[in-house]
Image: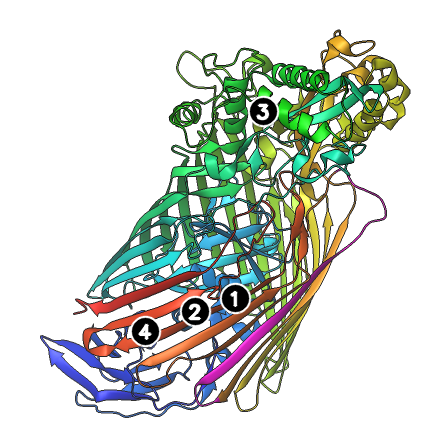
Amino acid sequence: MKRIIAVLFTILPLFTLAQLNGALILSGRIVGENHEGLAGASVAIKGTTIGTSSDSTGKFSLVINQKLPFTIVISSIGFAPQELEVKSTNAKLAIQLTSQTFLANEVVVTASRTSEKILKSPVSIEKLDLKALKETPAASFYDALGNVKGVQLTTSSITFKVPNTRGFNIPNNFRFMQLVDGIDMQAATLGVPLGNAIGPTELDIQSIEVTPGAASALYGMNAINGMANLITKNPFTTQGLSVFQRTGVNHVDGTDHSTSLLTETAFRYAKAFKNKFAFKINGSYLQGVDWISNTQTDQNPNNKNTANPAYSALDGANNVAFDGWNKYGDDALAGSNTVSVTGLNIDGTANRTLTVARTGYWEKDLVDPKVDNLKFDAALVYKFTKNTQLTYTYRIGKMDGVFQRGNKVKLDNVVVQNHQLELKGKSFTIKAYTTNENTGDSYNVKPLADNLDLYTGGSASAWGTKYKTALNGYAADHGGSLTSANLAAATAYARQQADLGRVEPGTQRFNIVKDSIIKINNWDIKSSTIPNAPVTGGAALIQKSNLYHIEGQLDLTQQVKYFNLLVGGDARLYALIPDGNNFVDFTRPIAERNTVLPDGSFGKDTYYKKIGGFVQATKTFFNEKLKLWGSLRADYNPEFTAKLTPRIAAVYTANERHNFRVTFQQGYRFPALFEALSYVNNGRVKRVGILPIINEGLGYRENSYTQSSVAVFNAAVKAAGNTDAAAIANKNLLQVANLPDGRPEGINSYEVGYKAVLDNNKVFIDVDAYANIYDGFLGQVQVYVPIGETVGSDAATIAMIDRNRDATTASGGNAASKGQERYRVYTNAKNKYTTYGSSVGVTYNFYKTFTISGNVNYNNIKGNSTPDLFVTGFNTPKFTSNISFGNRAITRNIGFNIVWKWQDSFLWESPLVTGAVDAINNIDAQVTYRLPKIKSTIKLGGTDILNNRHIQYAGGPTIGALYYAAITVDGLLNK
């Protein structure tokens, strides 16, 4: 955490400068207030890029070819930087630095794409420096994002975590951009940021900069809610071999799984040669047992019209329309796994109807919780001059995990590779990179469950016929009719009979069938009525894509002179390989889009592209007390009209301590690849993107009814006997969707803030408040298209009756109707949405090196008077808070940190699961012990140490305590 530290900063032997073969060797040792060696302290030659950093004992050594005299700059986080002029070869110096919080001079680059002091940033920005990352009690440096002011970190898996700021949180977050050294880490076809799956290792991370709120004025699409930039270590200044080993245990109470080991091993090696060439290599491997999603809450209780509200005997565990949070194949709310059992005689009244969901399978039985994450990266850096360098970086990551999109997806052996080439000079940067994605052995959990049911139990209508036969048989054996007294027992018996032959989890037959289904690249749910027919429907997720990106920026300040001027531009191309399930070749006929061509492909690649550019001007006034920013960005995607995104900001500094800022910016977000072009034949509900080409021949935009109105309609029809006549009589309940043409999502963002360093640099205060207005909010709505009919007609009305009802016994049967197609469509909301909130962060160095810090965050959304096409899903608690107490150096070698985290309860809304998320109240803690003689640090700690089991989102995994021990050996082979 950020500290104000009074220190004695000494350079030992104390400081030496020697000559060797014409070169100068600068060496020494840097210590802190308790004479502990300061690791990671920087020693640099002023005006050059020549420098190094101290090892875990505080020692450093730097070979230089520099004429005397020259100036060195010594700095360490938590200490005021010091400049020293070196005039001779026998200098020996002892230096005491003044007390100062590092925030006063801390520099960030993400907020404005140029270096600036964090106190004078035009927008809210948070920075986790190397010291804060080392001292966090979180299980990894990436988990430390969850303690940052304003950040909501969502855990889908141990290997897969997604940050968000300022509302509208979803596990596949299209609105928050994540960079690693300026490289976008979003997996395009998966439609999800990869967290740290292919990012830096524990040993290579230098800092993290987080910008809550819109950043699209400078960074373009996918930065509408905020962004995080993970910055890695420089191989010129941080050299040598480092190794890291962490071993932990989770599932400590054995509730979801037996107690399990979690291990992570990492290494880093960097070497520089004569300050002209340097390289670094990193690798890590993590393995463990994932957190498990097994919440058995029913989201379709009998008081809903999608269940059986007239029959109280079917409440609770007896609810035949049960739709479990973490169960699949029972998806009653989506209307995809239910049957209507008609013509029943209940309590002496004939022609009654029950809505029944198929039995389905729990997620824990469909997903193997064992996960691992293997990643490697290497960088080569060559300096042409002291200010110009060329860098090539390669990254590859292989990961497992689970993430939630429209459905749950099991990621298995997903491989993502990234190549980057960057030429950087004093006033310019040119960067190009490509990312390749391959989903490996991944699969979609819902079609797996659907096809398990289909293979072993036949179609939904066949299953429903067996259910009804058993129900009537039970009635005949118990007085000739169904009554409120025996209805629960009757339905339990009927389900048992209908499920005969169903594969049961844990059996060899289940595993054989499951393994065959997850290898088949076909999510179609066939209508076969024959159980145990050859498996044709599958669940394999086979997605491949290539992303190509180039960008550059140029600082023209020297040419303009009157103000600072920065210009830049970028271009991006997605090359999408059709897979037949998520993406298809739209030039092929509709009926053939999911079929394989003779060459083994699903058609031609699809391209999705955009270009953009920006200009930013800054100017200071009144002896640099007032600084003004103005920027304008233009982005163009051929599928939409071009968009302009301006940003204006002002920062006023009073007495060098009080910094006030105000910012307005506008932003637009083009639909992400999945939102734009997906064509997911996902069982009985197809998920489709926003582009008009997808709708051609399908009619879901102009010829459909809303899902909510179809549910109300069917409830009324069921109550009236489920006949065609009852349907026509309730025709007015159906609402035509009339989905608008797709357009980019826009935002107007207003922000004010205040940062200050007070009380002789012992107190740091950071306050911000914002209001965001979203226009054209992008989300999903489910609609029903009558097959072969036009909405408004009687035939279209009849087609909306549950297609799985038993037509043979219903009066005025539905045999002539072709039923309906169901689509979940990406589209724009009709209403505008206003979100607002505020954050307060305080750090107080109250005694020596003891520090307490904390933050409180408030986020809310303003309601609208009229309902929209879909539920937007704000999915953010109103209040969250963190309080940290620690001391990095109680003694020379011991430090500790404790963090208390709390958030209030909130409603989570998504197409998959909607429900309440309970309040969270956790404590994380760690103790660090340094062993300078062997260049090692031992860290003992735990997250949620009291094991307060909790979920972070509806449908997500249950998270509990994780206890760990880690050892880092740093600075080996540093010669």
Q: Is residue 854 magenta?
A: yes
Which residues, given as a range, are shown in magenta?
Answer: 847-869
Q: In front of the other: label 3 or label 1?
A: 3
Q: Earlier in the sequence, mark 2 or mark 1?
A: 2
Front in this rendered view, residue 94 or 257: 257
Give the amino acid type for the residue marked by disc 3 in the picture: Gln
Magenta stretch: dominant SS?
A: strand
Q: Earlier in the sequence, mark 2 or mark 4?
A: 4
> Vertically, is 845 above or below 236?
below
Whether the residues at callouts 3 and 4 have beta carbons within 8 Å, the answer is no
Q: Secondary structure at mark 3?
A: helix
As helix, strand or loop, the secondary structure at mark 4 comes to: loop
Q: Earlier in the sequence, mark 1 or mark 4?
A: 4
Q: Position of residue 385 (x, y in %)?
A: 29, 63
Relative height, residue 546 to residue 44 (above, below): above
Which quadrant of the figure contains the C terminus?
A: bottom left
Name the front one of labels 3 and 2: 3
The residue beneath circle 4 is: 40
Residue hosting label 2: 136
The answer to whether the residues at label 2 and label 1 have Cβ atoms under 8 Å apart is: yes
Q: How far apart, in angstroms, are the residues tagged by discs 1 and 4? A: 23 Å
Residue beneath label 3, please? 496
The residue closer to the viewer here, 432 or 260, is 260
Amino acid under disc 1: Asn
Left or right: where 517 falls relative to 562: left
Task: Give percent across and percent down for residue 942.
Answer: 42, 65
Mark number displayed over residue 147: 1
